[in-house]
Image: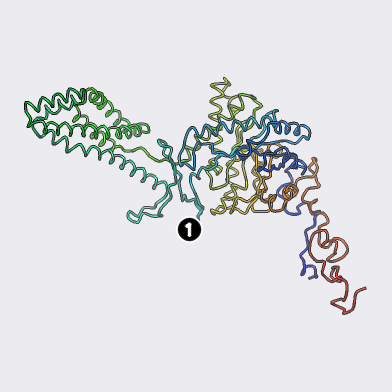
Amino acid sequence: MGYNEVFYPGADNGMNPIYGKPISHDVAFSSLGTTTNARTANQLEATSQSISSGAKAVEVQLTFAEIEKAIPRQHLEELNRLRKLTGVEFTVHGPMIEPTGINPEAGRWDESQRQRAEAQFISSIDKARLINPDGNVVVTLHASHGLPEPRTRIMVEENGERREVATGLAVIDKRTGAFGSLPRQIEQDYLTGEKADVDTALEKYNKQKWAQSLSNVNVSLHRTEGFLSDFQEKEGSDKAMDLFVLSKKNPVKYQGELDSMKKEAPELVNVMQNKVNNLTYTDIFVKEAYTGFKDLFNEAYSSASGEDKKKLDAYKAEVAPWIKLHEKDPSKLPEFEAQITKGIRMLDSLEHPPESFKPIKDFAIDEASKTFANVAFHAYGKDGKGSPVISIENPPLGSGLSRAEEIRELVEETRKKFEKRLIEEKHLSKSEAENQANKLVGATWDVGHINMLKKYGYTDEELKKQMEHIAPVIKHIHLSDNFGMDHAELPMGMGNVPMAAYEDILKKFGKETGNIKRVVEAGDWYQHFKTSPFAEIAASFGSPIYAAKNGPYWNKAMASSGGYQSGYGMNPDIHHSIYGAGFSSLPVELGGQMQGRSRMGGAPIE
């Protein structure tokens, strides 16, 4: 074993085509892009700096709404001139805004909030059009920003098998817009022996909520029972009912009747007044119960089907006349109370009572797709077939709609809504509308964001399945590397994102670099190392230096003449001076620069 093997392992041969184990030699340098600094409104200067690094594609950042508003229109128009002058292709990152209308701070959904988000996105689309009015500029918009993860899942291994387990569920009450999380409290119901999970927990919670709502209506009805029974059992009920009706229709005349009674039968005045007062209280409680009952009936009717729908229809046909009759004739109060009591029993007998809370995923996809489809339609209305491409990005894991199946469903639902508007309002044929929707709506897939699944126990093989699922709708790729634990942004090849496997999958689905751009997001590298990571990215991919794509490659250029034994003999000082090792204090017989007495011979080295 030589001294160099003991002291220093040396370097690979930099001229080896697979030096550094490049991701792929098929990713053209021109298809790799870089981002500008999102923290500055001077995107013109930031873009110029990115271009100076040699990038042929640059993503202009309108990421933060509070900064985007300070970008001058003239800068956007100047970016268009810069694009034409340099031949660099621009893409745009739109503002990070919650598209569903859900406000995490308020803890509820609001349609006006969704409309404001839509207006902000549309404003950004118009700015992207100034940057590239020639059309089809890719604009990335986040699928969510602040939305909780719809279904929190981890990967576990039991009895040699791997399976996903849901540990939390985000839910929403569509009536009120309130939302929150429904965590799995315990793994097993020890009383019944049943396994517990978030779905059964939600089902039980909804049943309890429904029973509680019925109980609240019953409380109001129970208050009336004493009054009505007391009223019906004693003499003078008919007279008291007449007085009660009179008090409702003509309070002045009612008071006159009481005054007359004081003269003719003073002993009856207090009795009649008490009876009328009791009927008045009963009327108040019955109306309160009816208001609650009506809300519950409408809630049940809106989601009912089958036998439940028949029960509700039958009751509606029976009770409707009593409702109208009571409004005209207050003397029908006892019968009205009986109908509400009957209705409560009917609601309690429903086989499938309504769900107060539902999983937030479907609701979020419906609302977000409405926003994105309207934004796409606005863009199409101005530019037609050359309009910007709406590309929906998966946010960092832990945010809402961050997994492949959720993003793909969101993309497909957005396309359907966009297609429908194109047919109805632009009078496109179904096939043409479908083609335009597929062309102008897709996904931006951030490989660093999805890599965070690893902290929940997912493997590279399971991450590859995510890529396979999303690949058909990908329009754009964001490149950032990390170790799967946090939202780091390192150059590719510096973490453990399985990008080589992803490239093979993308190629299988026709997503070669000639079709889509791969934009580098390496904010952590910029922050800590203060240099452009673009050369490192090109080297990690092994991109060809020249357009002919037959070598040399960036991975070889980055390490040319970098072998440990290159130069003059073992441990050359030129190696250390070029490649930065701190060996200057070694004795000269070991390749150092320290003059004086030899540590081996005991005499100075001449």
Judging by the rendered image, the residue that carries numbered circle 1 is 159
Name the foreground residue: 531 vs 14: 531
Left or right of 231, for residue 503: right
User: Which quarter of the image is occupied by the N terminus?
Assistant: bottom right
Q: Amino acid at mark 1?
A: Asn
As drawn, which residue projects farthest toward the right? Answer: 606
Residue 283, how many percent across, how many down? 22, 31
Name the foreground residue: 110 vs 211: 110
- Displayed quadrant of residue 97: top right
As drawn, which residue projects farthest toward the top? Answer: 427
- Displayed quadrant of residue 306: top left
Left or right of 178, for residue 277: left
Residue 178 vs 160, above or below: the answer is above
Residue 190, how many percent across, how many down? 35, 56
Residue 108 vs 537, above or below: the answer is above
Q: Residue at x 38, y 44 (%)?
A: 203
Residue 164, how many percent across, how many down? 49, 50
Q: Residue at x 53, y 41 (%)?
A: 406
Name the foreground residue: 344 vs 251: 251
Q: Residue at x 17, y 25 (%)?
A: 254
Name the foreground residue: 302 vs 379: 379
User: Which quarter of the image is occupied by the C terminus?
Assistant: bottom right
Left or right of 181, for residue 40: right
